[in-house]
Image (cartoon, grey):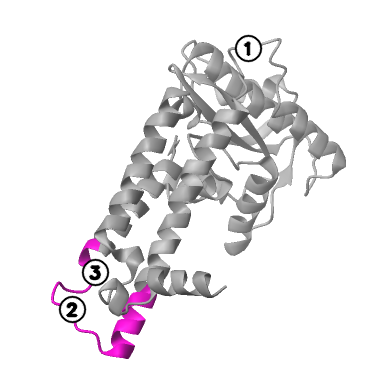
C-alpha cells in the first residue's frame, strides 16, 4: 500500500524526487504515450479496424426519437408521434441509397422521399426528410440537424405530427458507414395509427428494421466485425481516458505548485495544453459525421 501511495505521489504531485514536476507531465511520459498510440493505430489498421469507423457505436431509434421531441418541447411544440409506416419508408430509403450508391434526398432515377412514404401506405398533407451519416452517437446526429437551418426547420415544423426513423449499416461509395434517415409527415387520413412513444410492439419493429436479413441483401446491409469494432472502441476510449488523465495531472500539478510556491523557469505547461488541444480535436473529428 505504501509503494502504491508513493507511486501516485510521484506521478501526480510535484516534489524533489520528480524535479518538482508531476511525472505524468514529463516529456518522456508523453513520448511513451505517443509511441503506444502510433503502435495501436498501425496495428489495428492491419486488421481493418479503420474500415469499421463508419459504423455507428451508439445510435438508436429510441434515442433519436427522444432527442427530436426534446428539441420540439424546448420550442413549445407538440411532441411527434412515432409512426411505423414512416419508419418503413425511412428504412427502404436507406436501402435504396446503399443499393444504388447515392447520398442525396433524390435518387439517380428520380426517386423521391415522397415515393417511399406513399409506397408504405401513408397519405400525407406535409412531409419532409433529414439524412445523416458517419456519426457515432445519437446526440451528435440531432445536434448537427439542429445546427443546420433546413434540418432544424424540419424538426421544428409545427405542421408535422408523425416521425419515423431508420439506422442502417452498409457500403456507400466503397466505405462502410451508418445511414440515419428521419422522415416527417402529417397525414391526410387522421385515422392512421401512430404512437407517442415506442411501446413493445414498435420496439420489435425497430429491432427488425435495424437488423436487416443479411442473407437476402449482403451488400445492402453488411454487419460489422464485432472484434474489430471492439478493438477500435478500445483505442477511442483510451484516447478519452488519457485526455481525462492529463487534465487531472495538470490541475493537480498547478494546484500543488501554487501551494508549495514552486517557481518554474520553463513556463506553465503550455506544451501540455497544446497536447491536450490536439487530442480533443482528434476526438471531435472522429465523432463528427455529415448531414443533408
Tell me which residue sits at (53%, 75%) in the image. Answer: 2
Which portion, as a residue range, is magenta?
251-271
Task: Name the spot of residue 176 as percent of width and height, x first.
Answer: 50, 23
Q: Residue at x 25, y 59 (%)?
A: 27
Q: Nearer the viewer, residue 52 or 157?
A: 52
Alpha-carbon span between mark 2 and mark 3: 10 Å
Query: In the image, is 283 to the left or to the right of 189?
Result: left
Q: Which residue is mark 1?
A: 218
Residue 37: percent from left, percent from top: 37, 43
Camera-side residue: 208 or 115? Answer: 208
In which quadrant of the rendered image does the N terminus lie?
bottom right
Residue holding disc 2: 264
Going by the picture, which residue comes out furthest to the right?
200
Q: Is residue 161 left or right of residue 58?
A: right
Q: Does the stretch in magenta take in 264?
A: yes
Label 1: element kind: loop
Amino acid at each position: 500500500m505504501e509503494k502504491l501511495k508513493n507511486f501516485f505521489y510521484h506521478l501526480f504531485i510535484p516534489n524533489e524526487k520528480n524535479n518538482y514536476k508531476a511525472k505524468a507531465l514529463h516529456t518522456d511520459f508523453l513520448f511513451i504515450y505517443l509511441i503506444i498510440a502510433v503502435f495501436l493505430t498501425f496495428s489495428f489498421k492491419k486488421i481493418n479496424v479503420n474500415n469499421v469507423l463508419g459504423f455507428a457505436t451508439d445510435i438508436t431509434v429510441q434515442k433519436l426519437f427522444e432527442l427530436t421531441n426534446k428539441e420540439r418541447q424546448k420550442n413549445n411544440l407538440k411532441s411527434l408521434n412515432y409512426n411505423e409506416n414512416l419508419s418503413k419508408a425511412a428504412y427502404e430509403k436507406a436501402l435504396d441509397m446503399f443499393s444504388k450508391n447515392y447520398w442525396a434526398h433524390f435518387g439517380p432515377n428520380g426517386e423521391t422521399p415522397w415515393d417511399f412514404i406513399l409506397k408504405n401506405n401513408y397519405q400525407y398533407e406535409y412531409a419532409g426528410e433529414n439524412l445523416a451519416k458517419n456519426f457515432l452517437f445519437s446526440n451528435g446526429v440531432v445536434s448537427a440537424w439542429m445546427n443546420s437551418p433546413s434540418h432544424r426547420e424540419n424538426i421544428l415544423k409545427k405542421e408535422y405530427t408523425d416521425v419515423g426513423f431508420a439506422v442502417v449499416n452498409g457500403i456507400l461509395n466503397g466505405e462502410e458507414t451508418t445511414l440515419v434517415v428521419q422522415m416527417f409527415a402529417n397525414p391526410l387520413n387522421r385515422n392512421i395509427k401512430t404512437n407517442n412513444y415506442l411501446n413493445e410492439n414498435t420496439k420489435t419493429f425497430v429491432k427488425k428494421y435495424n437488423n436487416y436479413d443479411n442473407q437476402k441483401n449482403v451488400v445492402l446491409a453488411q454487419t460489422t466485425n464485432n472484434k474489430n469494432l471492439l478493438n477500435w472502441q478500445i483505442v477511442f476510449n483510451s484516447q478519452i481516458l488519457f485526455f481525462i488523465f492529463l487534465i487531472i495531472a495538470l490541475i493537480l500539478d498547478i494546484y500543488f505548485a501554487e501551494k508549495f510556491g514552486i517557481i518554474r523557469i520553463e513556463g506553465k505547461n503550455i506544451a501540455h495544453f497544446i497536447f491536450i488541444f490536439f487530442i480533443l480535436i482528434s476526438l471531435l473529428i472522429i465523432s463528427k459525421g455529415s448531414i443533408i
